Amino acid sequence: MKTFYIETFGCQMNVHDTEKVVGILLAQGYSRVLEPGQADLVLYNTCSIRDKAEQKVFQRLRQFKREAGRDKRFAVLGCVAQQEGLRIFEKAPHVSLVCGSASYTRLPGMLEQLEAGARRVTGLELDAGETFETPFTRRDNPYRAYVTVIEGCDKSCAYCVVPFTRGPERSRTSRSVMEEVRRLAGAGCTEVQLLGQNVNSYRDPSAAGWDFAALLARVAEVPGLRRVRFTTSHPRDFVRGIVEAIDSNPVLANHIHLPVQSGSSRVLERMQRLYTREDYLRRIEWIQVARRNIAISTDIIAGFPGETEADFQETLSLLDDVGYASIFSFKYSPRPNTPALGLDHQVPEEEKGRRLAMVQEKQRAIQLARNAELVGSLQEVLVEGYNQATGQWIGRTAQNRVLNFTRAGSNGASLLGEYLSVRVTRAGPNSLAGESVESAGTPPAAESV
Ligand code: SAH
Ligand code: SF4
Ligand code: F3S
């Protein structure tokens, strides 16, 4: 019996790619093991967005260097594979397979070459066409599913490797998306998350010609779905039609992730983000005047080259102006091939750290205050897990907040995948706590705020 172990780093796109790769491996007669020590084939699906992420895979590979041999093979997939290509064989000579995400449909043939004894196999073409779907995708979660709608990225943000690691934008046909979503809903899945590095530039390549707002509206009409999410939106391509779609169908979750990166127009220009602070705030206003209460989250980079103290203060003031429900924040990390490498005035590491800490401290206070507003309210959650240590169920609200809750008399019966109404009793900066008050399946007593 052939066995494999896979570990995933990086974004939701990578998590979903792993589901495709797992399906391909199972179809090729492999079985999955949960320890690398037990596997004939160890795969790392890698991320290259920041240096730290890239280093992780090389650390892992070093750990197992001595075990590699005819009976134990190593594969590097994903964004580091695409970025480093054949150099991976130099850095880690015990690796036998290097394959970027655009080539996963060719994995079966590549696995056969490996099994036939090939020492080094590669899949590094970026123009491999249709890579959205395999007939094999093995999703981990029966209730929530990722669905890729667009691959790649045509922007050229000065700090970012994604255009190199995922190639140019390729949209999937609306028909193929709709078929997959209907099939998922038919199998009992109630939440789908549409994925793309820039979902807003989705353009149906078929005659129907839908834009992203149109696709979103149609997906939300598929019977059986209760929540539809999407990520990521680029502010430049974000249109009001998306807010209107959310306003007109409650199945579309009231949460938008709109990465800003910096609050300073000067820095945004150096980042080649193609919008100013004012352009961004106009989009925020569209969202904030919507009929529904839509949570907004963002990404921030601290210490981009040339970011002055005054620029940085503008990022802090933007956090106050928008009042984000949550943020992801990072120190700027210089990346290979990116235009920002050539910029002068790099910010010292220590100063980046100081700025990052200030961003996080400010946001923590904002989140605590925003979450505290929810105490006493009723929220509908999808139950995603159970925490043995605390005896709490883990739920997620439509606005994407984590709400840990207790439920009297649940008698150990699984609530996973159910939608429950939960009264919020406490708020922390990163999550809420509460008690489930209604029986499963009943609609929430109030529109979730
Ligand atoms: N397509 C998405 C972002 C994908 S990368 C978008 O355009 O928003 C996710 C986040 O990683 C980015 O939003 C950015 O905040 C961060 N990031 C990307 N490159 C980075 C780098 N070189 N250093 C630090 N953070 C980076
Ligand atoms: Fe990277 Fe910019 Fe593309 Fe996002 S939009 S993936 S940050 S290049
Ligand atoms: Fe990382 Fe690649 Fe995603 S670089 S963030 S895994 S697109």
Image (tube, rainbow, N blue to C red):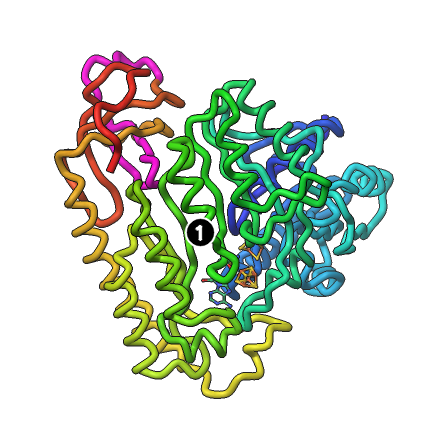
* Element at label 1: helix
Rendered-image quadrant of the N terminus? top right
Height in image: 428 above or below 321? above
* Residue 407 included in the magenta stretch of the image: yes
Front residue of 59/409: it is 409
Q: Which residue is drawn at the image coordinates 55% and 44% (left, top)?
A: 195
Return the x and y of residue 369 as percentages of the image width and height: 16, 52
Q: What x and y, as percent, mark residue 389?
A: 26, 31
* Residue at image point 52% right, 45% down: 12
Does the beta carbon of the residue at mark 1 sit less than 8 Å from ligand 1?
A: no
Question: Would you say residue 342 sits in the magenta stretch?
Answer: no
Q: Residue furthest bottom?
A: 344
Graded by Cα atoms within 10 Å as few (under 14), some (14 to 19) or many (20 or more), the crowding at tag 1 reads few
Which quarter of the figure has residue 252?
top left
Percent position of residue 281, x then y: 35, 63
| Figure quadrant of residue 111 | top right
Residue displayed at 29% across by 55% down: 324
Q: Is residue 240 above or below residue 448?
A: below
- The residue segment tinted magenta is 391-414
Residue highlighted by disc 1 = 240
Position of the C terminus, as image quadrant, is top left
Residue toward you, 330 or 44: 330
